[in-house]
Amino acid sequence: MTSAFRRDYKRNSAITDSETSTNTRLQVIFTDVLQSLLGIIRRHQVTWEEYRAATAWLTEAGAQGYEIPLMLDVFLSQTVDDVNFGAQGGTESNVEGPFYVPDAQLLERPYVLTQREGEAGERLMFSGTVSSTDGSPLAGAMVDVWQASAAGEYSNFHPTCPEGNLRGRFTTDDLGRFELETIVPPSYGIPDGGATAKLLAGLGRHLIRPGHIHFKLSHPTCRSLTTQIYFEGDPYIDADVVGAVKDSLIVGLVRSDDAATRCSYDFVLASRNEA
Ligand code: DHB
Ligand code: FE
């Protein structure tokens, strides 16, 4: 440790190094975060002007509702997902993103994702199955779906998109199958005009995610799974601003002249008795 580092450490550890200190995970991780940030300030000789700009950015982001979680999701969530998806097998997990809303409407068969009259977008029949890593189909698995509209808007977050739009929950049939009618979500930009967009612009980065549908799947005998499905041929499939796309989560779209576009995916949940 350089003497500057030692000085930083001594100053900041005074907060936690008391007689009663227990080295909680918060203390361990926060100390590491702080050491990294202090090192960065020294290495780049951060000016007061830059420090104030960072403070102002955080103040602005904090006042904009979901901009802080959005920024954390954009830059960090992919890696949190990586370190948490273990060797349990089954369909790969994927980030939840900032736009999940619990308790979406329970749909009845035939399943049509809740939508506006004349909802814009290419009609999609998404079919598939849910089974367990031991090979058995999972009847009555709960499937919770949410996605953006053709205009790239998530309901409950974008003011012009009605609450609950393009969100819904449904269950698989006796053979673990499901079929859902919805629309193909095009690639879209994460909300423009906010603090996260401003930061990305400053970094010279675009705001686009490839089109995707979010899924949460659960069944009493298995581990729950949060993932996303992407579409082959999407122009941003290799350039996701969040960097979350995984090959195993990309499906092909089958188009026809006289029917809705189709795709399918067979989800596999890790059975609870596996590592
Ligand atoms: C993020 C994820 C999404 O699914 C989305 O629609 C927007 C942002 C994210 O992880 O930042
Ligand atoms: Fe999303």
Image (spheres, helix red, strand yellow):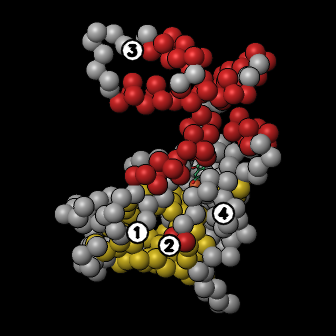
Q: Alpha carbon of mark 3 to alpha carbon of mark 1: how far?
A: 41 Å
Q: Position of residue 47 (x, y in %)?
A: 77, 19
Q: Quadrant of the C terminus?
A: bottom left
Q: Which residue is mark 4?
A: 210
Q: Are marks 1 and 2 in contact (CB under 8 Å)?
A: yes
Secondary structure at numbered mark 2: helix
Q: Quadrant of ligand 2?
A: bottom right
**Residue carrying label 1:** 91
* Quadrant of the rendered image containing residue 185: bottom right
Seen in the image, is 132 located left or right of residue 121? left
Q: Residue at x 34, y 68 (%)?
A: 89
- Rendering quarter of residue 41: top right
Disc 4 secondary structure class: loop
Q: Residue visible at 51% across and 50% down? A: 79
Which amino acid type corresponds to the residue marked 3 in the rendered image?
Answer: Thr
* Helix, strand or loop under label 3: loop
Type of amino acid at the residue the image marks with label 2: Ser
> What kind of residue is marked 4?
Pro
> Residue most toward the bottom?
257
Q: Earlier in the sequence, mark 3 or mark 2?
A: 3
Report the residue marked by disc 3: 16
